[in-house]
Image: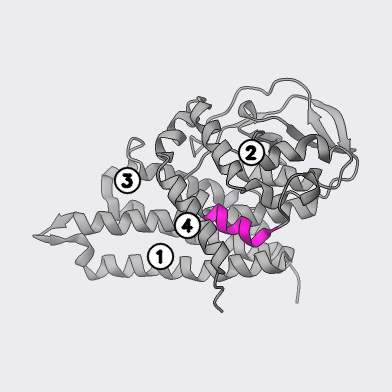
Amino acid sequence: MRFLLDTEQQAFARSLHAMLGAADTAAVARRWSRGEHASGRALWARIGRAGVFALAVPEEFGGAGPHPVELAVAFVELGRYAVPGPLVETVMAAVLLGGSETAARFLPELAAGTAVATVAAPSGYALDADASCPRLLPAPDGLRLSAGAPGPARRSLDPARRPAPLAPAGELLTPDPPYERALVWARLATAAQALGVGLALLDRTVAHVGRRVQFGVPVGSFQAVKHRLADARTALDFARPLLFGAALSMRPADVAAAKLKACEAAYATARTALQLHGAIGYTAEYDLSLWLTKARALRTAWGTPEECRDAVLPRGAG
């Protein structure tokens, strides 16, 4: 099955591609990983002005949404350029707050990109809590604001993803937040981001093996190398229709399948990229590492492969 983007969606993707391509996102991500947020917040504001976060916010609160297909289009580009920050968590926060009495208090700023939100994962840690406000904390009695400053950020496999423990629960925002719906949106955005990461890894690897010479010929001319790259391309191409099909249906099982396939394809592409780059691929100073580590981190974000498989086909079914 093929999913063709319409003219407006293609133009949206091209505009984000051009904007992010000129933004030196690798340098932004490296500064973000050191806790230096100025350039990241400036890029975040530009992404907000482009309308990305508005796609998850209802029109009555300054948004343009909900538009899950367009959101997937945008997050593919965000992943392609390794944009740092709690991108998925901000979308999730918009969904969690969308039907609450406090929606008008938070959603206009989230839609505009003037605020950055994060949401605590089941582990109790929240991504980039030191750069986010509001910081949302699921609690037994509903969704609450975290009261006070977060704890120190922990080191992560992906240095640009900086989880930190949140302060204890404070103000109750809504007693009945739509957790399941928000999780579906989070998984969709994560799947799209992973697909973009995989595409970037493939492009960079193809360029590298075209430049690297062994025995007087480019490495990319070797049949074994071509096979590895073809396998990566095929996996990513199969993930794309699952992603956009899930964005159309927004059924939890469809979105879980898309996340599983996109994240596994990106992870497999990362392994191929690492092997074909050789020793340089292991160095943190080489920009490839920004995408390698992100592919691994996204694989388990908001749903491990096992959890996504259970969402598609529960254990014991059939």
Image quarter of residue 46: top right
Query: Dot 2 surroundings within 10 Å: few (below 14), some, or many (20 or more)?
Result: many
Q: Residue at x 49, y 53 (%)?
A: 15
The image's mark for residue 137 is: none
| Mark closer to the chain start, 4 or 3 | 4
Name the spot of residue 97 as percent of width and height, x first: 80, 43
Residue named by callout 1:
232
Residue named by callout 2:
113
Q: Is residue 247 magenta?
A: no
Q: Quadrant of the N terminus?
A: bottom right
Q: Residue at x 69, y 39 (%)?
A: 110
The image's mark for residue 14 is: 4
Residue bounds of the magenta highlight: 67-76
**Local secondary structure at mark 2:** loop
Q: Is 58 displayed left or right of 128 in the figure?
A: right
Mark 1 touching mark 3, by CB under 8 A? no
Name the spot of residue 172 as percent of width and height, x first: 88, 32
What is the three-letter code of the residue carrying label 2? Answer: Gly
Q: Is 262 displayed left or right of 144 in the figure?
A: left
